[in-house]
Each structure stands twice: as structure tokens, then as C-alpha cells.
Amino acid sequence: MERNNAIDFIKFFAIFAVLVIHIFPRDNQIGLFILDNFSRFAVPFFFTASGYFFGKKIIHTKDSIDYFKRYIVRITKLYVCWLFFYMMYDVLIIYKVAADAPNEFEQYFNHFSFLDLIYYGRGTSGYQLWFLPALIWSVIILFGFFKFKKVRLLLIASLILNLIGLFGQSYSVFYDFPLSTRDALFIGLFYTTLGFFFAFNKIFKKAKAITAKTYLLLIFIFAAIQAAEGYLLDKVLSGGYGEYFLSTIFLTSFLFLFVLNNNTLGKGLFITKIGGRALGIYIVHVFFINIFDIILLELDMDDISDNLFLKLFKTLIIFTMSYIAYDLLQYLKRCLNRLRYVKTS
């Protein structure tokens, strides 16, 4: 399967956008609020890329069930390991700061529900981990529909669910949907299925007739609409916090079609290599955000935490540390695998 460098190239900007969302205060200035809303393409793009690569593998493998099982096991292991990591981090923090540690421990572990752990991926300080169970469940549902040759039906159904999910997010000003919609059913499933659809190139041959300049213009237009939509819904209509919008669907679709038709974009660039580590940076960066904030608190400097230049410095430092840390973990993993191979051979 030919490598698409453009996907990793865009992943670099997508993972940087995630850090912007998590680090910069969205309500301080209009410019930062707009920047936050511009960045909302990131997670939908990650879901779409995951669905695309899963689809490509399914197309080119003889045993789709075997690959599906290995894929789910790999993502599940990743989720369980990092869920445990953030749990242990939380326990250490409780031990350090709690006046009544045993009682705090009991409250901490009792607040987890079954759905929190296996579906929503929430409850720990690693709030970003929700992406992994959402991807797992999205792929499970997607594969089931694929085996029954009903992916088109799923794309339509998941789009409807995504639109309904807007009322639990940005459009709650019109109707406050009673369920949490930051999950597989309302976000992950549609974008993962969309990426899976993009994997079947024959469906999108007509898209190749559109020039790169046209795609870039469409991307710019819908990025601007997404920022305007977020501003209108929150600041003007007082709808509150939103994570994705109607315009996000169009922005993500045109952005992904652009990378599919310009697959050598970013080839050989260092940022493209970093983009290839986007999932690792995504998983680990919240840990470094927490550590950075603890250091500021210990130095009695938390009062300057909203300083724009400090936020920029913090973003660059955390981005760099997250990349190095995850790259180091992958290196250690390869060393352990080689050592295990030597012992068994």
C-alpha cells in the first residue's frame, strides 16, 4: 500500500491544534477564541484518518477478520495501558495533596462507572483518552456493517447521529440533548466511516478533477465558517462550549480529499515524521500539561498561567516533550522486542 505523506503532514498541524485547545484559554480574547474554533477540525481528522487506514488494510488483506481482531486488540491494549498510567498518576497526586488520603482514594475509585471505563473513556486526569474507546467502538460497528455490505447505510445513519449529537455540543442553545455526545456513537462513528469510505478510491475518482487551489479555497472557507459558527453560537447566542459543528463535516471532508489527491505533500519533512507520531503525542501530552501546571503552582507562579507568551512557550515545550517521550517509549519497546527475540531464538 502506497504511503500517503500528506496525511502525516496534516496530522502534525492537527495534533498541534489539539494542544492549542487544551492549553490556550478560549475565553480570554476574541483572537484566542477564534483560534480554538479553527482547531476543532483536529479530532474529526484523526477519526477520518483512522477509518481510512483501516479501510485500506481491509481492502488489501485476505483475512479481514484476523486484521480486525488484531487492530482492536492493539488499540484496546493502548487504551488500557494509558488508562492505568493516568489512574496511577491521579493516585500519586491524591497521596501528595489529600489531607485524608484513604477517603480520597475510596471516592476516586468509586466514582468510575462501567460505561466510563469501557465506553466514554473518562474519569481520570487523562481526559483525552476518550478518543481510544470511541475509535474502538466505531471500528467494531463499522466492521459489522462492512461484513454485511451495508457501509453506505452506516454512513447515512452515522451522519444523522452526528447531527443529533450537535445538540449535546454547540447547538445546545436550541435544544439541550440529555446524553453526552463526546463518544463513538455521535462523533467517532461518522468520521471513522467517512474515512473508510474514502479508502475506496473508485468512489472518489471525480474528486480528482478538483484542483488543489480549489480544495484549499474550500478548506479556508469552511474553516472560517467553523470559527464564525463557534463565535455565533457561544458569544452571540450564549450557547456555551462546543467541540464540533455542522461546518466541521465539510471542513474535514474537503481537507481529507485534499490530502488524498496530494499524497506527496510534506514528503521528507521533519514535521511529517512528527505527524506520524500524532497518536502518541495525543496520548501523553496531558500528562506534561499537568506536570507543567504543578511546577508553576509549586513556584507560586500560577497567577501568570494565562499570560499569552507563557502559553505559547508552554505549548512548544509540551509538544516537544511529548514527541520525545513517546519516541523514547517506542525505542524502548523495540529494544525489549529485540531482546525477547534473542532469548527465544
Image: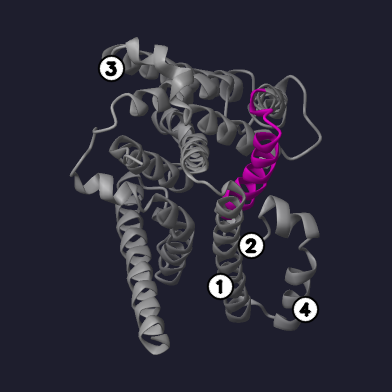
Q: Are marks 2 and 1 in contact (CB under 8 Å)?
A: yes
Q: Amino acid at mark 1?
A: Tyr
Q: Are marks 4 and 1 in contact (CB under 8 Å)?
A: no
Mark 4 vs mark 1: give the one in front: 1
The image quarter containing residue 20 is top left
Mark 2 vs mark 3: give the one in front: 3
Query: Which of marks 4 and 3 precedes in the sequence?
Result: 4
Q: Is residue 147 magenta?
A: yes
Q: Quadrant of the C terminus?
A: bottom left
Q: Nearer the viewer, residue 10 or 303?
A: 10
Image: magenta residue range: 129-152
The answer for how far apart the CA atoms under marks 2 and 3 are is: 42 Å
Query: Which of marks 1 and 4 precedes in the sequence?
Result: 1
Q: Residue at x 69, y 35 (%)?
A: 145
Q: Nearer the viewer, residue 167 or 80?
A: 80
Is residue 182 visible from the viewing direction of this image? no
Residue receiving disc 1? 89
Q: Secondary structure at mark 4?
A: helix
Residue receiving disc 3? 212
Q: Residue at x 58, y 20 (%)?
A: 246
The answer for how far apart the CA atoms under marks 1 and 3 are is: 45 Å
Q: Nearer the viewer, residue 261 or 274?
A: 261
Q: Amino acid at mark 3?
A: Ala
Instruction: Give the vertical position of 259 relative to 115 (above or below).
Output: above
Residue receiving disc 2? 124
Left-right relation of 115 to 284: right
- Residue furthest to the left in view is 268
Query: Which of marks 1 and 2 precedes in the sequence?
Result: 1
Q: Secondary structure at mark 3?
A: helix
